[in-house]
Amino acid sequence: MTEANPKAWKKKWYTIIFESDTKAGRRFDVILLIAILASLLVIMLESVPTLQKHYRQWFVILEWAFTILFSIEYIIRLIIVKRPISYALSFYGIIDFVSVLPAYLAIILGGAQYFIVIRSLRLLRVFRVLKMVRFLGEANVLSSALRASRHKIAVFLVAVICMTFIMGTAMYLIEGPENGFTSIPVSIYWCIVTLTTVGYGDISPQSPFGQFLASVIMILGYGIIAVPTGIVTSELSKSNREAEAAQKKNCSICGSGGMSANAEFCQYCGERL
């Protein structure tokens, strides 16, 4: 076998596995997505006692079939990439590895004394749901928006934490242990539950002033929930505009820009783009 043949083989499979804009790549992505969803369905059905009792053997067979399939996929990805170690340590590489790890750990840790450990390790199979992240076409735009807004959100969260400490402490002083606010941590917990509009109802203020403060916290909760949403939405719109601008074509003849990515001729001078 010549040196060119292995390179051609790797290039062909790299196009199929990593290039989703090709026909073969799209077909591979669809098959992989169906396999991931089917494996997650098996995991969920296996947790149903009646189904597990009657179809345990089938669940084992299907689980090993998916494990072998994802193992082959993972090995092929390591073979065809230029830097296997870099891919293995990347987000997708770690997820691919974790998705097949529990089944092999169950073999190594075999034995009745490890049954509880094996059961917990098998729950790690649910991380296969993260394998679907690679199919989110807008994930990069969303990720860049979250990174751009992380400082604003961090400052906002610090302000919210300070407010919960102050209001929780105030509620502890107002209500006291006799009304269920037995300590400042418990009062802060109540403040967080109220501020997020969850409202478990396990603790509630009894005095008029405490109820007034609770009402203020509830109203603030609606505004607080909207703030991070607005921050991320603003950055997301900015990222979308930048992505659209990057796809615009410029005319090398007249220097005009802003043409559509699908345009073939300049709208100003008529030259081919």
Image (tube, rainbow, N blue to C red):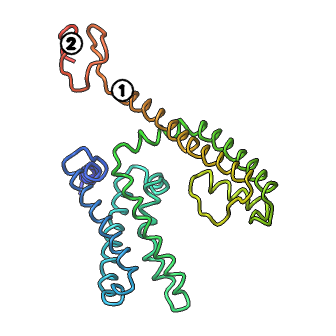
Disc 2 is placed on an element classified as loop
Determine the residue positioned at 50% across, 76% down.
121
Determine the residue positioned at 36% across, 63% down.
75
Spot occupied by residue 198 in the image (x, y as percentages of width and height):
56, 57
Give the numbered dot on residue 66. none
Q: Is residue 215 left or right of residue 79?
A: right
> Which class describes the residues within 10 Å of circle 2: few (<14), some (14-19), or many (20+)?
some
Disc 1 designates what residue? 246
- Say what amino acid the circle numbered 1 marks: Ala
Q: Is residue 22 left or right of residue 176?
A: left
Spot occupied by residue 19 in the image (x, y as percentages of width and height):
28, 46
Q: Of the residues under marks 2 and 1, which one precedes in the sequence?
A: 1
> Where's the C terminus, which quadrant?
top left
Spot occupied by residue 191 in the image (x, y as percentages of width and height):
68, 54
**Of 200 and 13, the residue lying toward us:** 200
Q: Is residue 104 above or below residue 150?
A: below
Spot occupied by residue 99 in the image (x, y as percentages of width and height):
42, 67
Disc 2 designates what residue? 267
Total count of labels: 2
Disc 1 is placed on an element classified as helix
Q: Quadrant of residue 187?
A: bottom right
**Of 23 and 258, the residue lying toward us:** 258
- Say what amino acid the circle numbered 2 marks: Gln
Q: CA distance from mark 2 to mark 1?
A: 18 Å
Q: Quadrant of residue 140?
A: top left
Q: Residue furthest bottom?
A: 112
Q: Is residue 97 above or below residue 5?
A: below
Q: Is residue 181 above or below residue 63?
A: above
